[in-house]
Amino acid sequence: MSVKMEFPDEYIEILKSYAEQNDVTVQTAIADTLEFLELKNESFTHYRIAVENPGNYLHDPEELNAKAMRQIYMDLFGEDSVGDTIHCYYNPDRLNVLLMDIVFDDSVPLWTLIETFHNKIPGMEFSQDILSLFYVHDRFDGGHDKIAELMDWMNSDHEDDGFETAGYYESIYEEPDDEEFFDDEDFDDYDDEDYEFEDDETEE
């Protein structure tokens, strides 16, 4: 049974302001917040993350190719952690959504992931002990199905199309035996200090 809810005008204005600041629709903001309230105190070892238009969160993204973009996002979520294996896919010509499959060595609170990425509340789906986080503008425009389909493809047996990167990050709580995390001879040179994430909101 569906329930129709009406919000006071002042709440609607708050929702509109929040949605504008976080580049989401009002409907998406409501759905994301309700899902967050249900799961906010939980911890998981396995996360999947989808970031729509990932360049919007970076300074000078036009100077980055797809491989560099993947590396920056993997470093963001992989470093300074309990240790994790990350599998990342990003092919902007196929779909301008960056995907990551992250398996941590120990459970990580959802709050930690939220704090890692702009303190921005994403959409959430929990299934088979995996929490999927969706940083998208509109959860209800039909694009969600395309993202979910691509995520399923990435995590299935498939032919490598050259737009995937994977690696393991050592835990910061242990003395690493080997400081070489990746073996990627083809990775284009770039200075990751030049490509910082925006602090509060996306670039237009």
Image (cartoon, rainbow, N blue to C red):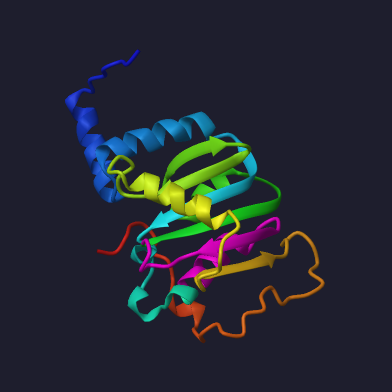
The one nearer the camera, 104 or 48, is 48
Picture quadrant of residue 107? top right
In the image, farthest residue toward the left? 9
- Residue 2 shows up from this direction: yes
Residue 21 vs residue 31: left or right?
left
Residue 83 position within the rendered picture, expressed as x and y whole percent measured from the top left = 70, 59
Which of 160/57 is in front? 160
Q: Is residue 15 above or below residue 186?
A: above
Q: Is residue 30 above or below residue 187?
A: above
Give the percent coordinates (x, y) of residue 28.
32, 39
* Residue found at x 46% / y 54%: 150
Instruction: Please tell me which residue is depicted at 45% across the width and 49% down the height of the picture.
Output: 149
Please state the total of marks drawn on the protein image. 0
User: Magenta residues, as a range?
Assistant: 69-95
Which is more toward the observer, 121 or 96?
96
Residue 157, x across and y down, in percent:
60, 57
The residue most toward the top is: 1
The magenta stretch spans residue 149: no
Q: Quadrant of the C terminus?
A: bottom left
Left or right, 68 with reference to 167 = left
From the top left corner, tell me how far across and down residue 195 is, in percent. 43, 75
